Amino acid sequence: MDDSADRLQSGPIGRKPLAGVRVLDFSRILAGPYCAQLLGDLGADVVKVELPGTGDPLRRQGPPFVHGNGISFYAANRNKRSIALDLKSDGGRRIAKQLCGKADVLLENFRPGVMDRLGLGYEALSLDNPRLVYASISGFGADGPDSGKRAYDLTIQAIGGYMNITGQRNGEPVKLGTSGFDVLAGTNCYAGILAALLQRGMTGVGQKVETSLLESQVAFLVGAALEYLLVGTEPEKWGSEHAQQVPYKAFKTADGWAVIAAGFENLYPEFCKVLGREDLARDVRFRTMADRVENRELLYGILDSEVARHASRELLAALEAAGVPCAPINNMEQVFSDAQVLHRHMKQTLQHPEYGEVASLGAAVKFSEFDVAGGWKAPPLVGEHTAQVLREWLGIGPSVTEHADTQ
């Protein structure tokens, strides 16, 4: 019997939009779990399927470890319940297939073909559950000559061109400071799932949603890609600089670093005025943005010396008063002491009944009709909710659980 209508019925103002949506999350490491976490933030019942005993490999990535888990695990696994299920066993696969029949969304990030071999592919599951939204994240895409390759954020940043445009001018390639394209692929998949759920509301039928780290990274090249596609030139590395705006970069001050973005015509004269160098705004070599781009080395040679004479705090205060975009370059302590960051609730503290308190990041999107961070839960222990989920989703009691390879 399909109970989805009862689970998804409208609730009062304040009810989260995905309340009642069941998500079965087979994904591991970062991209898939991050996607599932975003769904959980909006109220979905996210059930994380983990290997009995060891769980998600991200739990073991470290040191440092907190409460026995690698710190990256906490970045992608709040608002989930965990069940332990051995998908290599007949009993584990049988339980998994039953759970899929009750799910609204399935999420997986195995290499293409793995779920089919487990009997958990889209074609098989959608026959029994045509409303299922089946979401897959892979390294290179579901098909094509490289679809079977292993992928990591580092290798994707390399093959997708991002490392070739990142780093100091004429310097060696540099990766982003985080696994940004794992997170981006997870965010893209999250958007795809929401779109598929919206369309299911109109058609009554689910569908397969696919994305990959490679596609997410290539789409993120934006202007750098179009410089090549439209003009035919290879983008350069610019460090903190901008290819088409000057001045626009990180400057060394007398006591630290600051970024200043004063490339536009209405900003550059104000920057010069703060430095006490109004002559630079009148100089014919630097009068327009095109002039400044053409003569960037000469201008930066002057500006670097001028900025280095000023302490960061005083310079930034003067620039802000003049309306020139600028900012200090903060470390993590400074980020999470920043008044605006704290005001926007980007630092959260979650509670777990066994291991206690754990820090978490806040939601990037807020809503007027519900508190997105309301009721958030700390990441689970491996298999913490196995019996609970099997009872709620399938009506299975302890005697069956003991023989289903869930320990």
Image (tube, rainbow, N blue to C red):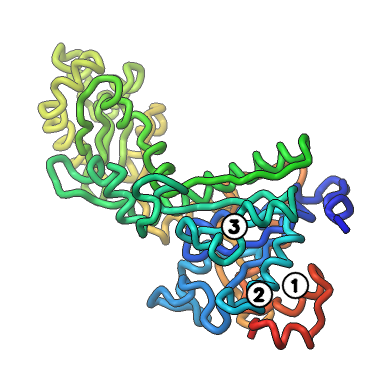
SS for tag 1? Answer: helix
Q: Is residue 248 visible?
A: yes
Instruction: Give yes or no for contact between labels 1 and 3 (Cβ–Cβ under 8 Å).
Output: no
- Would you name the residue on which mark 2 appears? 83
Residue at 69%, 52% in the rendered image: 126
Q: Going from the N terminus, do you reach mark 1 or mark 2 first?
A: 2
Instruction: Give yes or no for contact between labels 2 and 3 (Cβ–Cβ under 8 Å).
Output: no
x, y percent for residue 266: 35, 17
Disc number for residue 389: 1
**Location of residue 263 with respect to 82 vertically, above or below:** above
Q: Disc 1 to disc 2, how far (Cα)?
A: 7 Å
Q: Closer to us: mark 1 or mark 3?
A: 3
Q: Give the quadrant of the C terminus.
A: bottom right
Q: Is residue 381 visible?
A: no
- Would you name the residue on which mark 3 appears? 121
Q: Disc 1 to disc 3, how far (Cα)?
A: 22 Å
What amino acid does circle 3 point to? Gly
SS for tag 2? Answer: strand
Q: Is residue 314 left or right of residue 20?
A: left
Q: Going from the N terminus, do you reach mark 2 or mark 3 first?
A: 2
Q: Is residue 67 left or right of residue 304?
A: right
Which one is nearer the viewer's eye here, 316 or 70? 70
Instruction: Give yes or no for contact between labels 1 and 2 (Cβ–Cβ under 8 Å).
Output: yes
What amino acid does circle 2 point to? Ile
Residue at 26%, 24% in the rendered image: 244
